[in-house]
Amino acid sequence: MVLRLGHRVQRDRRVTTHVGLVARAFGATGIAIADTKDESVVESLRRVCETWGRRDFVVVDGVDPLEYVRKWRESGGLVVHLTMYGLHIDDLIDEIRASGKDILVVVGAAKVPRVYYELADYNVAVGHQPHSEVAALAIFLDRLYGGKELRLIYPDAKIYVEPCPRGKRVVVRERQP
């Protein structure tokens, strides 16, 4: 699961949608958008799930982020905060994967309050230079799943891309009775 902090409706709509798209495509179970309600992001992600698969992908907005993190930890889950100030992903990913716990990945938008650094089980950096939270999430999930998520075609997808050396090949599945 991914928790998106700091979403600002007018400014971050596209980036938050991309965080959700990466979460879905790279194997996360869902996205929770902290504090703010934004039906356009929720609806965009639901439409993608309906067409490309993963109708079970959870999309919620307006959640209390501190409560969400605390409940996640209380239920035995692991909290991973992605930040360029954390320890390098290559030094932690095996330990995180080996935990066998459900993982909540916290990604920020604006400045992330210190409390999230303290609540996280791991503060993880994919690099120590300024970069996008979308890129950080993609790299983290790719390392977590060892690249297996890159070949996923979801069984409930109405359409999917069939790889080809040139051009574009999109397969449209016939509706099931």
Image (cartoon, grey):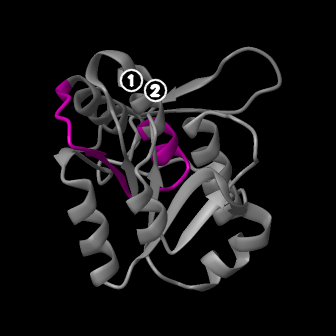
Q: Residue furthest front?
A: 114
Q: Secondary structure at mark 2?
A: helix
Residue count near mark 2 (Cα–Cα under 10 Å), binned few <14, some 14–19, many ≥20: some
User: x and y percent of residue 16 in the render?
Assistant: 40, 32
- In the foreground, 46 or 73: 73
Residue, disc 2: 15
Q: Amino acid at mark 1?
A: Asp
Residue 146 occupies quadrant: bottom right
Q: Is residue 25 magenta?
A: yes
- The quadrant of the picture occupied by the C terminus is top left
Residue, disc 1: 12
Q: Secondary structure at mark 1?
A: helix
User: Is disc 2 in contact with disc 1, using a CB cutoff of under 8 Å?
Assistant: yes
**Left or right, residue 168 beside residue 4:** right
Whether 41 is drawn above or below 89: the answer is above
User: x and y percent of residue 60 in the render?
Assistant: 22, 46
How far apart marks 2 and 1 lie (CA) works out to 5 Å
Q: What's drawn in magenta, residue-wise?
A: 20-39
User: x and y percent of residue 160 in the render?
Assistant: 52, 34
Residue 41 occupies quadrant: top left
- In the foreground, 137 or 8: 8
User: x and y percent of residue 89 in the render?
Assistant: 72, 62
Whether 167 is drawn above or below 12: the answer is above
- The quadrant of the picture occupied by the N terminus is bottom left
Residue count near mark 1 (Cα–Cα under 10 Å), binned few <14, some 14–19, many ≥20: some
**Left or right, residue 166 beside residue 104:** right
Q: Amino acid at mark 2?
A: Val
Mark sitting on residue 146: none
Q: Residue at x 72, y 56 (%)?
A: 147
Q: Residue at x 24, y 33 (%)?
A: 42
Whether 83 is drawn above or below 9: the answer is below
Q: Is residue 140 magenta?
A: no
